[in-house]
Amino acid sequence: MAEVTAVARAAATGAEKPAEMAAAAGPGRLTVITGPSGVGKGTLVAALRQRHPQIWLSVSATTRAPRSGEQEGEHYFFMSREQFEQQVAAAGLLEWAEFAGNLYGTPRAPVSEHLAQGQPVLLEIELEGARQVRRSFPQGFQVFIEPPSLQELERRIRGRGTDDDSAIERRLRRAREELAAAPEFDAVVVNADLETAIGELEALLRLASS
Ligand code: ADP
Ligand code: 5GP
């Protein structure tokens, strides 16, 4: 793996918002985590949740087929395109977007409920959804996860073994577009060394490191 030290920085453009202000916004705090497919978002979020069980992770709706081991209601709410479109029509989604040929969206009501209860809320979503949430929740905090290199990103997607060649190609093409948007975010974390990246996220989200 490339020897790159993870760095977090305040974004130079986009919403000029000190990290401490955004992370402290209450009653609950909404954090969006975005980054190219395969960069390690799921791995990072799982580690954060294990260490900080008070975090509530939104479960998205998707029209993608379940991968082996994925459970309904735990990893996603799996639905047909028709069911998804009904959710959109009923304004049941806080944001939604098409990604690599499938629809993904965040159910609105549970996010509002957990924020009202004062819980830290995490959304792990792609770029278009992050942009929508930025408009509806400007007080939220948005972190972009970068790979140490595109070669390492491809290695991770292939290593995960969940996508066929055409899906990998689509995900890599989209990754290049997403990487260009990193400066829009409040902070960028490079997921080179996993432990370092987790520590940086804990610092950005004001979670006591364990
Ligand atoms: P995403 O949720 O962003 O699509 P995943 O969390 O599924 O990405 O990670 C993709 C692959 O990369 C997985 O096989 C995971 O174990 C691996 N991975 C995640 N973080 C790192 C890291 N810091 N170094 C090496 N491999 C990693
Ligand atoms: P995957 O198919 O690998 O689970 O997810 C593909 C992409 O969809 C990832 O970038 C993931 O962050 C994003 N994603 C997952 N749920 C949502 C959602 O609710 N809304 C949006 N906009 N993107 C999502």
Image (cartoon, rainbow, N blue to C red):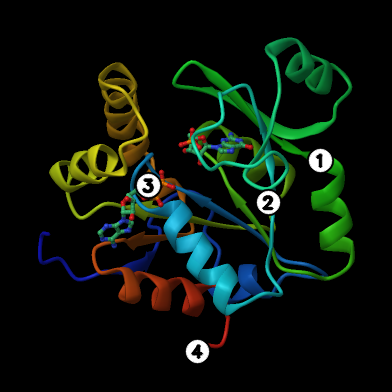
Q: Is residue 10 above or below residue 151?
A: below
* Residue 34 coordinates in the image, percent (x, y): 48, 47
Q: In the image, which disc is placed on residue 138?
A: 2
The residue indicated by pointer 3 is: 182
- Residue situated in front as seen by the camera: 34 or 83: 83
- Residue situated in front as seen by the camera: 50 or 15: 50
Circle 4 crowding by C-alpha within 10 Å: few under 14, some 14–19, many from 20: few
The residue indicated by pointer 4 is: 210
Residue drawn at x 28%, y 39% is 157
Circle 2 crowding by C-alpha within 10 Å: few under 14, some 14–19, many from 20: some
The residue indicated by pointer 1 is: 108
Instruction: Classify mark 3: helix, strand or loop.
Output: helix
Instruction: Classify mark 4: helix, strand or loop.
Output: loop
- Tell me, yes or no, whether the two marked residues, 2 and 4, touch with CB atoms within 8 Å: no
Measured Cα–Cα span from mark 1 to mark 2: 16 Å
Q: Quadrant of residue 170?
A: top left
